[in-house]
Image (cartoon, grey):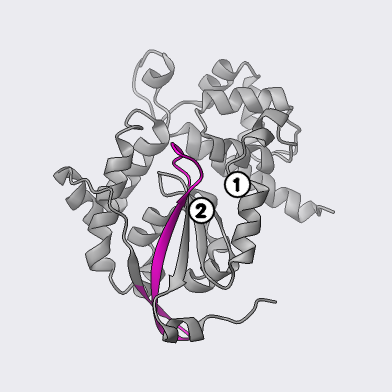
Amino acid sequence: MTTAVESELRRQELARFLRSRRERITPEQVGLPLLGRRRTPGLRREEVAQLAGVGVTWYTWLEQGRDINASEQVLQAIARTLRLDPHEHTHLFRLAGAPEPESEKDCQVITPAMELMLKKLEPYPVAVRNARCDLLAYNRGYTWLMGDVDAIPFEDRNTLVQCLLNPEWRKRMLDWDTNIPRVIASFRAAMAEHVAEPAWKSLVKRLKAESPLFAELWPHHDVNSEPIRTKRYLHPDVGLLRFNFTYLYYGRRSEITMSTYTPADEETAAKLPLMFD
């Protein structure tokens, strides 16, 4: 049963999520004229309401975390207006406490089979990502390796963001200096098919503003699609770990990747937790 406190926290998270997605959409992207000086980035609340066909007051209350109910039809309209991708679309419905439409359930990124694989491969760390480096799913082995991923806010649950902006991740990744330029080059290569998408452009804008290294390397236009096969980590409890990587793609043209971390030597294998409670 959901408590009043949990419901309040969920509504506040929904409010922050909607604001963050509204602020990354420009008026030009949705066919609105750019008139006068705008005080805030992205769209105004009344513009989102107009485009989604909902009342301005109602949408304002939704962004304020008020205790109101949103129908599937309204949520779908907001998702279209804010140009949410499938990952964000699912997140919106969950935060709103609404059942996901059947059409969405049928094409969910993380299938029951994938969830089973994540669990069965423990204690090996496993993570599922999209081309934008968003963490779509992960198992307890991954959380053991990288820290409390569950505590990371949804909008920051992106491996590129964490590698560049999270000091704890940087400390754990021993080959950070060598690997991070390759990761950025790989991200640029993947972006070739998404150059006009707000989510990608917003991520680049954020990283250029918050990561001096990203701001330095991004204008070089380096591209690299060759995945990193071996990585070293420094775990705070067990010390040095070496892993080989295997990349499993969800389908022939899918951009969803399941990355498995298998021990590269017996010492690493011996240090993995035997079981989870």
Q: Nearer the viewer, residue 199 or 132?
A: 132
Magenta part, dominant SS: strand
Residue 236, compared with residue 71, is above or below; it is below
Residue 8, given in percent of the width and then of the height, sits at 72, 49
Looking at marks 2 and 1 on the same chain, the residue that comes earlier in the sequence is marked by 1
Question: Does the segment drawn in magenta span residue 32?
Answer: no
Q: Is residue 57 left or right of residue 161?
A: right
Label 2 SS: strand
Which span is picked out in magenta? 232-256
Q: How many marks?
A: 2
Residue denoted by label 1: 110
Q: Nearer the viewer, residue 85 or 42?
A: 85
Residue denoted by label 2: 128
Measuring 68% from the left and 51% from the top, which residue is drawn there? 9
Residue 65, compared with residue 33, is above or below; it is below
Q: Amino acid at mark 1?
A: Ile
Q: Nearer the viewer, residue 177 or 45?
A: 177
Residue 267, given in percent of the width and then of the height, sits at 43, 86
Distance CA(mark 2)–CA(mark 1): 8 Å
Query: Pointer 2: residues within 10 angstroms few (<14), some, or many (20+)?
Result: many
Label 1 SS: loop
The reply to whether discs 2 and 1 touch (Cβ–Cβ < 8 Å) is yes
Residue 114, given in percent of the width and then of the height, sits at 61, 52
Q: Residue furthest left?
A: 220
Question: Does the segment drawn in magenta span residue 246?
Answer: yes
